[in-house]
Image: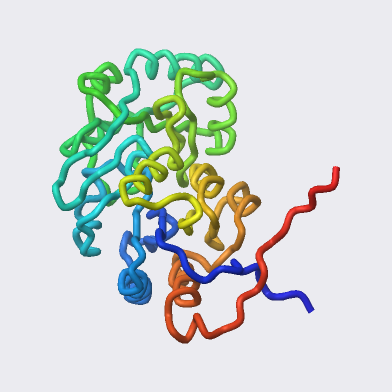
Amino acid sequence: MAPPTAYAARTTYSLIATDLDGTLLRGDDTVSDRSRAALAQVTAAGARHLVVTGRPAPRVRPLLEDLGGTGLAVCGQGAQLYDVGADRLLWSVTLDRELAEHALGKIEAEVGQVYAAVDQDGTDGLTLIEPGYRMPHPTLPAVRVGRRDDLWGEPISKVLLRHPTLSDDELAAVARSVVGSLATVTMSGPGTVELQPCGITKATGLALAAEHLGLCARDTLAFGDMPNDIPMFDWAAYGVAMANAHPELKAVADEVTTSNEDDGIAVVLERLFSPAGRSQPQYAPKTLSMEP
């Protein structure tokens, strides 16, 4: 009989990279007691927990402080490397505002009007939303501006897009087809299609953070739920998708755990880091055929 899932053959990782929304966070933007306990086991074992999120640094600071984090976090889809304890950006890449405006024009030429928001760069950057844009996460603070031109007053890390009728998959597909090298197009959650600096992904930010910590890809176990996590899975040694993940991410994952509401991260971490879990037999990883 085949094993119920394809577990990693190895049982230890030095870097645990977790997305937030739809992954570590429950729908109410909280972290469960079970997940907190599992992350504490990770720390007790000498491994590092690193948040890798699309949220900009100012929107994750309270959560990271609540988790007791004082180290690094990858924010803004990889455009920011944030030192939580010092409350400063060690590295950041901004999206050229003229290119962003040009990219928006190309997208709207194909699909009609879209509604846009931006995350400003910096540890005190604001999220600005134009008329008609609806925040996918109503708990996150945002400032509504009077017109689109007001979005471009300060340096930005990314643009967020919504369309009144197209699905996220449809909007992302059109954006990728017309934006070209103007920006990188990602889909990071329900109602969240984004433009970020060209070539910047979660993988670039994660690789930089790992280097700062003296670690590398083979040390890394990654968790996620959306297509923007695919580069992170490609870079890490092992990628775990949540049960609620987008099909594109599940297709490239090494393992699918339970949902974010059912403590999917804790399920895997308990297996790898708790004494009871480490005593259980481990199954072999999935293998890919090399035949033509």
In the rendered view, tell whether residue 211 sits above or below residue 115.
Answer: below
In the rendered view, tell whether residue 174 sits above or below residue 50.
Answer: above
The residue shown at (26%, 50%) is 60
279 or 264, nearer to the observer: 279
Assign the N terminus to one quadrant of the image: bottom right
Residue 19 x %, y %: 41, 53
| Residue 167 visible in this rendered orientation of the protein | yes
Q: Quadrant of residue 32?
A: bottom left
In the rendered view, tell whether residue 16 sits above or below residue 32.
Answer: above
Direction from residue 276 to residue 210 in the image, left or right: left
Looking at the image, the residue that sits furthest to the right is 292
Residue 261 x %, y %: 44, 68
Residue 269 x %, y %: 45, 71
Q: Quadrant of residue 96?
A: top left
The residue shown at (32%, 43%) is 75
In the rendered view, tell whether residue 270 sits above or below residue 113.
Answer: below
The residue shown at (24%, 23%) is 155
Looking at the image, the residue that sits furthest to the front is 214
| Residue 225 visible in this rendered orientation of the protein | no
Specify the color scheme. rainbow
Assign the C terminus to one quadrant of the image: top right
182 or 14, nearer to the observer: 14
Residue 207 x %, y %: 41, 43
